[in-house]
Image (tube, rainbow, N blue to C red):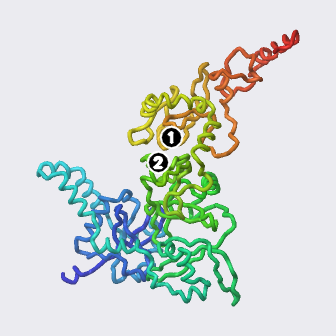
Amino acid sequence: MAKKKSEKDVLIVRDEKTGEISVVAGLDADGSPKRTPAKAENAQSFLQFDRHGDVLDNFFKNFFRQCKEPSRFGFYRVAADQADKLLEVMKDLLKDPEANKELLAPHKVDTSGYEKQVKEEQTTGMPEQKQEGQPKETQKQENMEQNQESPQQQTQDRRGYQPIDESKINWQELEEKWGVKRDDLEKSGDLQKMLNYGKSDLVKVLPKFGGEAFELDARLSFKKDSEGNVSLVPHFIRKEQKLDEYKEHKFSDEDRKNLRETGNLGRVVDIVDRETGEIIPSFISIDRKTNEITDIPANKVRIPERIGKTEITKQEQDMLRAGLPVRDKLIERNDGRKFVTTLQVNVEQRGVEFVPGTGRSPRTAQTQEAKNNPTQGQAQGMENSAAPQKEQRRNTWTNADGSIRPISKWSGVNFTEQQKADYVAGKAIKLENVTDKQGFHATMYIKFNPEKGRPYRYDTNPDNAQKVAPSNESRTQVAVNSEGKTNEATKNLKEPLQKGQTAPKDDKQQKQQEKPQKKNNKGMKM
């Protein structure tokens, strides 16, 4: 019996979504299995389970308690002392689990019992706590303690975020191979950036090819391998990227447009780590100095609550976390200077940046706003005298924390669930069948204006960044029917315009349009 209790197993995990095969090295904070490549040289990282102990049971119970997608992972066990021989065989079999079902059956871990047990605990646990008189706060504290990592694990995690150990850098080799000198990097301030996992500015490097040195411009960074050795990574200037795909993520037309205009993807996407198979939500940007596509895990980016003296609202923080730009944000620096700019997460900054080319003075921004919205500019003079009324009106459209208050319809048209979510996220939504003042259907766009604190109606999509606005099927209709304007091609018609109409729709209306023109021959119309 003693011998059996000392026998150990390791768990092989298959990501059913990506097909990646790894070995369990523990549990991540979100309950998903912490994985390491299924290679014999990584054996020291494998988590070993006593075949007859409680560790395996505790592992799966915590897995089902915390993991959001437990059905995504399949587990297989092999003897720890045979792992180096069986890993490659198991990897081949797991490429097609269904076809190799019989061969894998002895290794397959049936987790249904653990899942059932955890569900029963979750459904019956709270009433039992009340019967026993256990305070809710006490139970919550115990759960937190159970989910906490051991001090050793916490220390290991903290070490992962420590600056690069300069003693591991072979400066003589770097100077001989790349012409890079430590003193030069230190004087320019680039060394400090590189030791903190950042990149230098553009520097001259002298790589040798065929015994001959070539002077090239590049940004530099350091990279650590699994043994802690540090090597230099040059990032040379590249031609403009084709922007087809990056790390198996295929760019859409909107992705390419965003990357070319702002240098940032504008959303968070899932990137698969090729070594571990882990899916990592990440931001993607283009290095504006080298045209290199770069990424950073979303959980490594800090979204600030304040920039200078300016507060970043909760809604704006949520937009930034989603990769969206916060446009026309008025920023006040600590020295009192103010400017208007666009905020967005950028990989190179490892946080929020002022998107280049969007900064301008508040006066310039106000002038541009008045030009783009003449009716708003005319009403500007009335705003100061009606400040209390304006503040009261704004509160009907926003929450106390400044976030957008949801609305469910506009001009009698009910929003879909997706439109409600898009509106709260600050996006423009398209309404197809809004009734104009004459009773006909029209198309328009509704979007919350954060500077004015209320929703605005637009004839064209305000999220479209093109300088020349596209034509809109209802622009003429709304202008004539609702705003009292005149269209030369339809000014003599007796009936209101219908959706998309810009000219007489039939022979009857054509005669109405032409008839008054014949009367004009009697005299000149002033």
Please report contact status of discs 2 and 1: CB closer than 8 Å, yes or no.
yes
Picture residue at 42% right of the left edge, 30% below the top:
392
User: Is label 2 in a helix, a strand or a loop?
Assistant: helix
Disc with the residue nearer the chain's start (2 vs 1): 2
Farthest residue, direction front = 335
Image quadrant of residue 71?
Answer: bottom left
Q: Nearer the viewer, residue 206 or 84?
A: 206
Tell me if residue 491 comes above or below residue 237 in the rendering.
Answer: above
Which quadrant would residue 447 be assigned to in this image? top right
Q: Amino acid at mark 2?
A: Glu
**For residue 8, side relative to residue 480 (left or right):** left
Residue located beneath label 1 in the image = 450
The quarter of the rendered structure image containing the C terminus is top right
- Residue 305 on image: x %, y %: 42, 53
Label count reads: 2
98 to the left or right of 288: left
Q: Is disc 1 surrounded by few (<14), some (14 to 19) or many (20+) residues within 10 Å?
A: some
Which secondary structure, mark 1?
loop
Give the residue number, with chain letter if any, for mark 2: 316
476 relative to 301, above or below: above
**Is residue 48 in view?**
yes
Camera-nearest residue between 241 and 28:
241
Q: Amino acid at mark 1?
A: Pro
Task: Indicate the quadrant where residue 397 lies.
Answer: top left
